[in-house]
Amino acid sequence: MNAELRAEIETHMALYPDSRSAALPALEAAQRVHGWCSPEAIEEVADVMGVTPASLEAVATFYDMLETEPVGKHSVYVCTNISCSLRGADELHAAIREAAGDDATFNVRAFECLGACDIAPMASVDGVYVGPLSVEDVPQLLDDIRAGRDVLADKQLSKRPCADVEANA
Amino acid sequence: MSAKLLLANIDEPGLNTLEVYERRGGYQSLRKALAMTPEEVLDQLKASGIRGRGGAGFAMGTKISFLPKGSMDKYLVCNADESEPGTFKDRELMQKSPHMLIEGIVIASHAAGIRRAFIYIRGEYVLQADILDAALAEARAAGYLGEDILGSGHSLSLVLHRGAGAYICGEETGLLDSLEGKRGNPRLKPPFPAIQGLYQGPTLINNVETLSTVPSILRMGGASYAKLGVETSTGTKLVSISGHVRRPGNYEIELGIPAREIIYGLAGGPPDGRSVKCWFPGGSSSPVLTADDLDIPYDFDSLAAARTMLGSGAIIVVDDSTPIVAVALKVAKFYRHESCGKCTPCREGTNWTVKMLERISSGEATPMDLDIIAGVQQNIMGKCLCVLGDAMAMPISSIIAKFRPELEAHIETARDRAGQVEALTGVN
């Protein structure tokens, strides 16, 4: 197996009194290498951690961010929980799905509340939060991902000030 | 103008770095705390009256005093799994002022005699986790974490643990199982985590906002902090407000101000020509209130008296353009998706509630179905290991009780367009 992956998993295991605590970070690391939590990826993690593959499979199937089927390389999680839906998230999700079509590059998913209702409707693109989005933003969003650019640079949460204007007085 | 403790200078460039945080007086509270005995620090936390900011509103000082005394392995776990729909306050704190959280954790661990701590952050918060990791490295290098902190004799190891997407891991015992590397299934309580938690050891679990407030409490003194807010809801609170308002976002308020001031004064109220139909005062798990309830003081006990809850401090506003059945269906679908499936009332109850609401929405129901849905909610509440099922049953019950005429009218008119489920449509 990939020596770097083994080393990363061992680093995580050393952080806890009980090394089994490293299951989530280990599976996440394996997913990054393999693209998903494939049977081979799970076998490798199990081998390093000294646990059974079945116990890790049970873990992998529980969590939304661990993929147990092959998926597109770029994840687009569209929040469709209540606050985002009140501002058009369901239409946004449908528009992204339609525009992405059967392009295997993308893993477009409707996601539960991503904790960014202040920029509703929003999406997490490979972990980068962008919003508020409209259906007009969709072509550029997908183009940015395809081109490897910063996704919708002016709509990233990281650049947004706090809403409480008195806070920075 | 109300006191800003958590959000003061929140957008100052570089506040996430140790240098700027220290320039703003950061880690002075830790120095003060380490010069005090653990009992003295605990007394300050008790005097502050601070109640947990994650959802349950339990007094922090009391929680610490539940931990057994002695030198056994004890743990502190910071719950940064923030996933209650409508809540995004901890995100802002961790992203912009991570050292405030770290400082609060070190002080709390000193008060509780704990030497090992974890921050469990939801996996979706990639940016915030990366910022926290960098802040942790700075704090370790500066001697604010690790062995013999600032020569005080107190030691603390603090590890950031990233989750992988599961609402139930915000429930404290589900979180503990997840942190032990398992599926995030809740545990039976008692024993409570303070007695038997992580790795079976006594465990103190606190929310990000609660712990981030600790440095302010030490700086001001518990008694001064307790003068903010109202008697049984002391201090300031971050409110995340979203949905149909003009200025969604995080605001820091003194507890006890009228809800109207938050919804209209701070967030600007619904867009022109529309009015508040209902609002969730504490995340999507809280029973809904209506436009008649806007003058309720926003604090733990006033909201409890109105038979709802402050929860995580997340206000979701729904305006009068929205069909109430679509709101109910959205909420119920979320809990169906997130039910871990361990307890039958929750697993089956969330599923059947969604199916019945879909029937109402699509015009295939009769008014009697409303009573059946209400009955199902009664059979979920209090009957499971954790409160996830209750978290659906509470808002759904309140929606059926408060909006029954609209739901009945919907059932009547919806028959004409049978088969079409009413969806939430964006109106902004």
Image (cartoon, coloured by chain):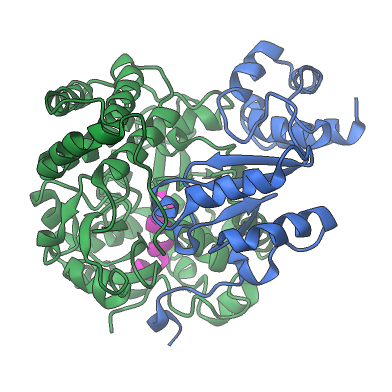
Chain colours: A blue, B green
Picture layout, residue B275 above or below residue B392? below
Residue A73 lies in what quarter of the image?
top right
Residue B413 in sight here: yes
Picture layout, residue B421 above or below residue B403? above
Residue B5 vs residue B300, the one in the foreground: B300
Residue A114 in sight here: no
Q: Is residue B68 left or right of residue B96?
A: left
Q: Is residue A74 left or right of residue B155?
A: right
Percent coordinates x, y for residue A142 in the rendering: 73, 54
Picture layout, residue B142 above or below residue B390? below
Percent coordinates x, y for residue B358 in the rendering: 32, 30
**Magenta region includes residue B165:** no
Q: Which residue corresponds to the image point at 62% horizontal and 66% vertical from the top-left?
A: A156
Range of magenta residues: B207-218
Q: Which residue corresponds to the image point at 33% horizontal and 72% vertical from the top-left?
A: B267
Q: Main secondary structure of the magenta part?
A: helix
**Magenta region includes residue B215:** yes
Q: Which residue corresponds to the image point at 16% horizontal and 22% vertical from the top-left?
A: B372
